[in-house]
Amino acid sequence: MTPSAFQKNLLTWFDHYGRKDLPWQKDLTPAREDGPAAIGLEPLRRPYRVWLSETMLQQTQVATVIPYFNVFIENFPDVRSLANAPIDEVLHLWSGLGYYARARNLHKAARLIAARGSFPDTLEELLELPGIGLSTAGAILSIAFNKSHPILDGNVKRVLSRFKAVSGWPGNSAVNKELWAISAELTPVHRVADYTQAIMDLGATVCTRSKPACGACPLNAGCLARLAGNVSAFPTPKPAKTLPVKQLVFLLLSDADNRILLEKRPPTGIWGGLWSLPEFDSMTAAQDWCLSRTIPITAQQTLAVRRHTFSHYHLDYTPLLVQSDNPINFVMEADQTVWYKVEQLNKLGLAAPIKRLLQQSQTRIK
C-alpha cells in the first residue's frame, strides 16, 4: 500500500467513523485565510486545548481524561489563566490523573507562553517548552496549525508496528527511529489535522492492544502483520522486568481538633509538589519523630499494608494512625507543613493513594 493509498483509506474511514465530539475538539478557531485551496478553509482547534489534551492523554486513556479536561478548562480556560494560577491549585485539579510532572511542566510552560505573548507554532519553539516532546509538538502543529509534522504516540506506534511488521520493543532507540521514519513517510501535507486525529483514533478504537478489529480496519489490505497472521506479535512487548519493592510507614497524625498533619513533597520526583503524609522507614522511627517534637501519643493504630505501583517500583506502605490529646501548632518549615481537617482536603493537591487513605480513615480519626 502506497503512502497516498494509506492516507486516503485512513481519512475515508475517519470521515465516517472518527471521533469528532471529544471535549477538546469542540472549540474551533476561525478558518485560516492562507489555507491551501486544495483543502478549503478548514477551522482549526485552539492550540491551548490541543496541548492540554495531548499532555493529559500521555499514558492515560480518553475516558479517564475527559472529566479532568472539562474541569481543567472550566478553571483555566486559556494559557494566561493557567499561568496565573497557583501551582497548588493546578496540582489539586490534576490529583488522581497521575504522572504529576505533566502538571508541573504544563504550569511552567504556560508561564513561558504567557510571557511570550503568543502560542509557539514552530517545532523548535515548542520543543524548548518543558514537557513537550516530538510527538506532542507534532500533534499541536498538525491539529492546531495545520502544519505537516509526524506524531508517534502509543496508539500510532501500535498501528505502524503492525502495518509494517516492525519487530522489537518500540522503546528501543533503533526501533523508535524506524517508526519515526515510517510515520514521517506516511504523514500527508493536506488534511494533516484530520489525518493526525484519524491515526490516533484508529489505534484507540480499532487497532487496539488486545482483540483488534482487523475486519473493520481501513488498512487491513496492506497490513503486513495481518497478512502474516500474527497481529498479536506486534508491537513487541517490553522486556519483562521484576520491579523492586520499597516499604514505608505513612504517619496519619491527628490532634485534638481532628486536624491531620500534611507535608509538601519536593517539587520533583514521585508525587512532586503534592501534599502527602510524613513517611518513615519503620514504626519506631515514626513514633520517635512524634516524641522528639513533644507530641504525646494518646492512641495509635496500625492499618493493613497497602500497595501502590509506580512505573519502576512497588510501594508497600503501612498507615500508622496516631492520635494526640491536644492541639499542636509546631511548624517544621514555612509553607512545607500544614494542619488540615479531612473535610478540607478537597482543596489540596493529593496523590490518589493518599487522598483515598485519608477519606477511608475519616471515621477512625473522628
Image: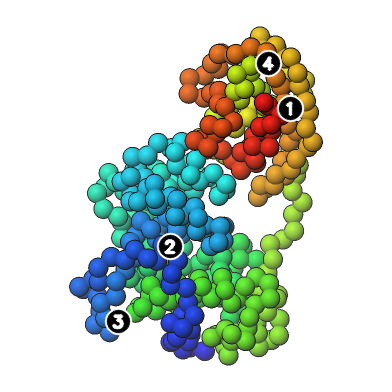
Which residue, as the protein is rendered here, is positioned at the far left?
33
Q: Residues within 10 Å of mark 4 (few under 14, many from 20)?
A: some
> Reading the chain from its start, which is encountered first: label 4 or label 2?
2
Question: Residue 189: horizontal and vertical position, in percent?
Answer: 35, 78
Amino acid type shown at disc 1: Leu
Amino acid type shown at disc 4: Ser
**Which residue is drawn at the image coordinates 66% and 47% (left, top)?**
310
> Reading the chain from its start, which is encountered first: label 2 or label 3?
2
User: Real-space Cα distance between discs 2 and 3?
Assistant: 24 Å
Query: Which quadrant holds residue 22?
Result: bottom left
Circle on res. 216 = none
User: Real-space Cα distance between discs 2 and 1?
Assistant: 42 Å
Q: Residues within 10 Å of mark 2 (few under 14, many from 20)?
A: some
Note whether 111 is above or below 57 in the view shown.
Answer: above
Q: Secondary structure at mark 1?
A: strand
Amino acid type shown at disc 3: Ile
Question: Residue 147: horizontal and vertical position, in percent?
Answer: 33, 70
Q: Secondary structure at mark 3?
A: helix
Circle on res. 39 = 3
Residue to which mark 1 is pinned: 320
Residue to which mark 4 is pinned: 324
Q: Secondary structure at mark 2?
A: helix
Q: 188 or 166: which is nearer to us?
A: 188
Note whether 180 is above or below 231 in the view shown.
Answer: above
Residue to which mark 2 is pinned: 23
Where does the C terminus fall, quadrant-wise? top right
Q: Are marks 1 and 4 in contact (CB under 8 Å)?
A: no
